Amino acid sequence: MKKNIILLAMIGAGMAFTACSNEEDMLFDQSAAERLNAASDLYSARLTAQPNGWAVQLYPTTKNESPFGNGYLVLMDFNEDHSVKCSMNNILSGGVYKSDVSAWEVITDNGPVLTFNTFNDVLHTFTDPEDVGITSGFGNDETGTGIGGDYEFIIVDAPEDASYMMLKGKKRGTYNLLTPIEEGVDYEAYLTDVKTFQATMFPANAASNDYIHFGDSVCIFEDAGDGIPAIYPVGGDAVTQSSFNPFLVTKRGDDYYLRFRDAKTFGDVTVQDYRYDAEKDLFESVDNPAFYICGYEPVAFFKEAIGNNTFFLKRGAGMSDDVAAAMEQVYNTYHDANPQYGPTDYNIILTTDGRLRLTVNYNPKSQSGTTLTYYFNYSAEEESVTFQYAEPAQEKNNMSKNHFTRVQPVIEKVFNDTFTISKHKTAFDLSYIRLTSKTNPNKWFVLQMKPKENVDVQ
């Protein structure tokens, strides 16, 4: 009996040895060089799997100040002949579209590494050790370091379906997400589209703050125009309590996505990616709707801003047909009498005595121009405001009185009314406010806050 047990144990050990031997044979049936080549081919195939390339969210460093901490959207199209087209449109390209073609390769160095092994005028902007010209106004000299980015990237994640890829800068350690670009999308048009959208949502010198909601916690989301917002608690101190988290915007189909460089964890929730919901006019976390970024409330903003700022309505700007007709009527009255004249804009501001002052500028081309002044009684309701014109006899300025009949169509048909208040295009940019007649929803116009640049509102 004892012999039988020993024999069975020997047979079992022999079977186990044979199984291990087979696994080792399978593991080592290729040489080291063959395994490296296979890995290179695998990840090269993943890079070329997207026929129109990738939108690369490139972060040169982990810093938090511009331009070193900015994210940069670079489009890359990898070809099987190991050429790659890189394109960008940002502050480093002078605000214009820039594209170049160079060589790429996947090498193995303790893992698969994507390297750009010939000069690329786009990509190597981030690794050029020359001084960064756009910082010279601040007395900075980056000779020897430049922006400080990478040209070799460890391939961290590359799923078989090529739905995304994740690269890690070999030197700087920043994580850079690649998402597919749909077939037929033109690179220059894509970059212009995203750049315009981001500038609309987060304009430089924004008139109002934005807010980021982390569940029950709300923070100010300030100065996001450069892509590096200051984030601090509502009621907190912007200097001592601000944190900075750079972000980039990309587009997939008809949707815009905002992704922060660094993920944030709140309890058991981690947030990093947000999708813009046009109907709600906010960026909502793709993982949890309790986390979102939104603009300021338009009604509250206008009522606060009108007491300290001038708003103007410009001829040819955003307005309904009947408002445009009234403005053209006034313009033509002056222009027909003297082709050098014609009202250019109408300014409104709330005075210290609670009245609304309307000034009408009509400017001869060769002189300094003349300003007419008219006053309205102003009252604010919960969701609306009322402008009620004061009789001409109350005007102290004789010239304004004499010109009343000429500007009467605008005074009575446009401004003399009760208006509801709303955003123009987005609550993220409340330098544009839309006023709509409470009794006639088809009558509306857009006021623009000064001293914003006089850009026509469409």
Image (spheres, helix red, strand yellow):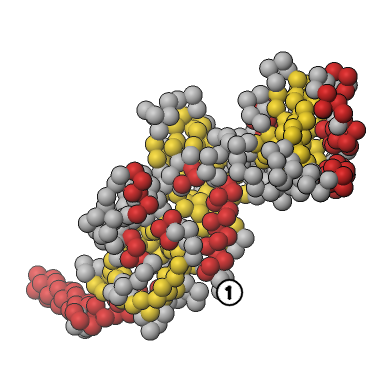
Q: Where's residue 74, x and y in %? A: 43, 63
Please tell me which residue is depicted at 40% across the width and 76% down the height of the picture: 101
Please tell me which residue is depicted at 57% across the width and 71% down the height of the picture: 185
Q: Where's residue 24, x and y in %? A: 19, 77
Above or below, 112 relative to 246: below
**Residue 451 appears left or right of 127:** right
Above or below, 137 relative to 50: above
Snapshot quadrant of residue 391: top right
Viewer-proximal residue, 308 or 428? 308
Q: Quadrant of the N terminus?
A: bottom left
Please tell me which residue is depicted at 50% across the width and 45% down the height of the picture: 225
Residue at the far right: name it: 405
| Other-residue count near label 1 (Cα within 10 Å), few / some / many at <14 / 14–19 / ≥20 | few
* Amino acid type at image mark 1: Gly
Residue of label 1: 184
Looking at the rendered structure, the number of numbered marks drawn on it comes to: 1
Please tell me which residue is depicted at 55% across the width and 35% down the height of the picture: 209
**Residue 424 appears left or right of 123:** right
